[in-house]
Amino acid sequence: MPINLEQFAQQFDRECIQVCKVYDWTTHVVQLAQDITFTFPTGSLTGVTISQVNCSITLLECAEDARRDIECTVGNQIVTLQAVTLSKTIQVVLEVTGTNTTGAQVTVVSNPALITTSEEVILCAPEGTTVCCNAVQNTFNTCRVGAFTQSGNNITANISVRICQSIVVTFEVILEVAARFCQPRPEIICEEECPVDVFPPQCPAVFPTMM
């Protein structure tokens, strides 16, 4: 449906707004596997026969370490982009399930362990822009436990981690737009009314006609 520009101009005024412009937005997968030693509260594993070990992960920090210009061929065009080095800190917690000496099932959680890693991502991130990355919250993110050994209050396990990140490059800009100020909606008043008695149906063929 075509826009009536004259009507549009009458309804909206020119306004300047400050917004966060997105220069680039992509996703990137972090995958790594390494042996990690987890510590547990003193005595928490004593007498426990381990039957299952699971792990959970949290992306604590993702920060930019450095960026450099790089020429890339995109389609048939050579463009100048930026190779951005991002360092990540991942928190891993081990959860152990088993039975104690009385035969009762118990679950013991380790103290958090930290994994640090860094990777280079190609972005449109010219000087002055800000690069932010966060973990995408979905079932794609996984943490798996491989072989493990126990020694007292410690468990050393092979941990495989996979995290999907959302990486956004932004810069604050001021834009001129056609807009109008918003107004609050009217208040909704909900009044409860006294119910009206509903009489049961009568039998006019019987009463009162037969009196």
Image (spheres, rainbow, N blue to C red):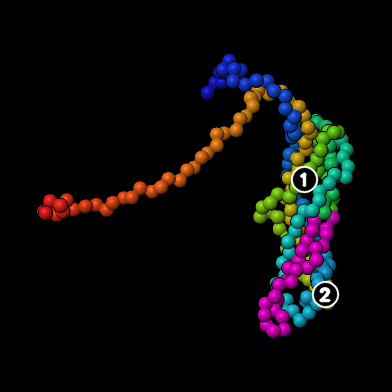
Residue at screen point 73% across, 76% down: 50
* Mark number, residue 133: 1
Q: The residue tagged with tag 1: helix, strand or loop?
A: strand
Residue at screen point 74% across, 71% down: 108
Image quarter of residue 83: top right
Q: Does 176 sit above or below residue 91?
A: above
Whole-percent x, y for residue 77 in the image? 77, 29
Q: Is residue 184 left or right of residue 50?
A: left
Disc 1 or 2, which lies upstream in sequence?
2
Amino acid carrying label 2: it is: Thr
Q: Disc 2 designates what residue?
A: 42
From where the camera sits, is residue 35 visible? no
Graded by Cα atoms within 10 Å as few (under 14), some (14 to 19) or many (20 or more), the crowding at tag 1 reads: many
**Residue 109 magenta-highlighted:** yes
Q: Nearer the viewer, mark 1 or mark 2?
A: 2
Residue most extreme to the left: 210
Residue at screen point 80% across, 71% down: 40
In the rendered view of the protein, which quadrant contains the C terminus?
A: bottom left
Distance CA(mark 1)–CA(mark 2): 36 Å
From where the camera sits, is residue 27 visible? yes
Amino acid carrying label 1: it is: Cys
Query: In terms of secondary structure, what is the magenta stretch mainly?
Result: strand
Image quarter of residue 55: bottom right
Residue at screen point 49% across, 42% down: 190
Whole-percent x, y for residue 81 in the image? 82, 34
Magenta region: 90-116
